[in-house]
Amino acid sequence: MSSTDEWLTLSTADGPMRVYVARPEGRATDRAVLVLQEAFGVNEHIQDVARRFAVRGFLALAPDLFHRNGVGTLAYDQHAEAMPLIGAIGPDAIVTDIAAVLSHLAASENIPNARTAVVGFCFGGRATFTTATAIDDLAATVVFYGPGIAAGPHAVLDRAKSVDGPMLLHVGSEDPTIPGEQIIAIGAALTAAGADFEQCVYPKAGHAFACDARPKMYNADAATVAWERTWAFLDRHLPVS
């Protein structure tokens, strides 16, 4: 199966937001996934990830969460420039943007929350966890190494009790942005909340271990297992109808 792609612009309470859309080519689908960006915008890698979902039969949408500042994308060596940008995006802004995409899916694609998953990477992992605490009836959420969930100015771990759908979390044991005590805290908070979740810790893997666009950080073994688990998790909670 292949995919087709396009950009569209959605209205949000904070202005227009561009969204990259990848569709399964030649077939309709009633299941969607939101792909939430790393700290570097909806770059070629995030677009490629969206197309991977489309090839597997999902309508994939990657909203530009940088739309308020107009930056677009940054190179992977612009980490210093990226930090203040993601630091400016708090929980309310994230929920505003995701709600706009979900409204579009319901109105224009006839795909409800219950047939939609959210998958995020790095900053997008924090955004995915935030989404899970604020928006009801999502089919599933997948967090790839999301720093800032348990500590930092936009930490949302105290909202874990509001998570009402299944969640899968991937984190590297050697990720300096998510130290061991935070991994434990996230698991404890979700357990105390009675959440349906699985947190997978990958030995010898660091931050961004699943990003094959960053060879120095990519860990092929961990990434392969994480994606296998992700596909199985999504197929379980978002089966083909």
Image (tube, helix red, strand yellow):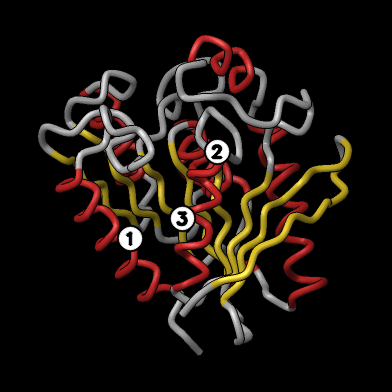
Q: Nearer the viewer, residue 99 or 174?
A: 174
Q: Nearer the viewer, residue 208 or 48?
A: 48
Circle 1 crowding by C-alpha within 10 Å: few under 14, some 14–19, many from 20 = many
Q: Against 68, is 201 above or below?
A: below
Between the residue at mark 3 and the residue at mark 1, the CA separation in whole angstroms equals 10 Å
Q: Nearer the viewer, mark 1 or mark 2?
A: 1
Which residue was labeled with disc 2?
127
Q: Amino acid at mark 3?
A: Thr
Which residue is located at x 67 percent, y 53 percent? 20
Circle 3 crowding by C-alpha within 10 Å: few under 14, some 14–19, many from 20 = many
Q: Is residue 211 left or right of residue 58?
A: left
Q: Amino acid at mark 1?
A: Thr
Mark 3: secondary structure: strand
Which residue was labeled with disc 1?
230
Measured as percent of width and height from the top left, residue 33 is found at 55, 62
Q: Against 11, is 166 above or below?
A: below
N-term-proximal mark, 3 vs 1 = 3
Task: Please tell me the numbered disc located at residue 141.
Answer: 3
